[in-house]
Image (spheres, grey):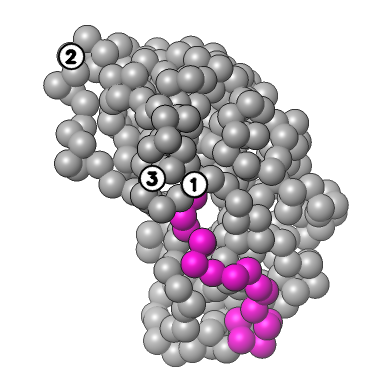
Amino acid sequence: MRYEGNIYRPPSEAYSLLIQVTIGCSHNKCTFCSMFKDKRFRVRDVKEVIEDLEMARRYYGNVGKIFLCDGDALCLANHKLLVILEKIRELFPECQRVSVYGSAKDVLRKTPEELKELHEAGIGMIYLGAESGSQKVLDYIHKGVTTDQLIEAVHKIEASGIKASVTFISGMGGKENWEEHAIETGKMITEMNASYVSLLTLMLDPYVPLAQQIRDGEFTVLTGEEVVAETYLLMKHANPAKPCVFRSNHASNYVSLRGDLPADKDRMMAQLQRAMEDTGLLKDERFRAL
């Protein structure tokens, strides 16, 4: 397969066929993120994407899932995405789901009819990085989006029949704004009513702008104990009206949580309470990873 630069995909797409539709990220200004800093954003020619799909068909037997890379494949116009999705359906009739990263602005540029069209053509999941429910934190990390836009985007995704998988980052507010980050993120989870929510914990490449702000004393990273307390406060305010699959079991997390909200909320909060009382239950720093 042909790939430019490092390839990133959500953990749940570990066994998916990865196909680059765009190179890099069209925003690429978030101060905590190093994923696409080495790439100049561009949209690949659809003919190249089709060639990659045909190449993959020759090499692979059963392909159950396909993930369209890089950072925001959803920025493509529907007429281009539909050509790609039609080819996937032709070449990989066994494929059960096609997924993409999508920014809130990508989603909001699509009409409800366009999103439904993508769903009918095979898009089953859109992964959206919200990072925080606090506008103050979003502005600080140069996310380039508002809390209202994030919530509206998730509502549009879910209304189309596509599942939204939203990621937040523990510790994103630092010690300076941890309470606001926790409370407002919990509230956003409640308002979004996404099908899936995942929680990572802040870890940084030393060359990203936020890492320099830490060295300059402008941002203070939470300790493991403080992250657990922040997660407990977040969970307290997370009350989605419909069932939401909640995961905080990434390699970066200090405590592994798996459950559904609101059904398993009390159990997960009790798990966090035990970790606050016995810090030996926290993952050792040596075993955390991006």
Q: Which residues are magenta?
A: 33-49
Task: Find out whether residue 34 is within the magenta segment.
Answer: yes
Depth check: 98 or 120 in front? Answer: 98
The residue wearing badge 1 is 209
Residue type indicated by callout 3: Leu
Q: Is residue 287 visible?
A: yes
Q: State how far apart marks 2 and 1 are (Cα).
A: 34 Å
**118 shown above or below 63:** above
Q: Residue visible at 50% across and 15% down?
A: 179
Q: Quadrant of the N terminus?
A: bottom left
Q: Is residue 116 visible?
A: no
Q: Earlier in the sequence, mark 2 or mark 1?
A: 1
- Asked where in the image residue 203 lies, by quadrant, the reply is top left
Local packing at callout 2 (Cα closer than 10 Å; few below 14, some 14-19, many 20+) is: few
Residue type indicated by callout 2: Asp
Q: State how far apart marks 1 and 3 are (Cα).
A: 10 Å
Which of the two marks, 2 or 1, is nearer to us in this view?
1
Q: Residue visible at 50% across and 27% down?
A: 173
Which of the two marks, 2 or 3, is nearer to us in this view?
3
Depth check: 36 or 20 in front? Answer: 36
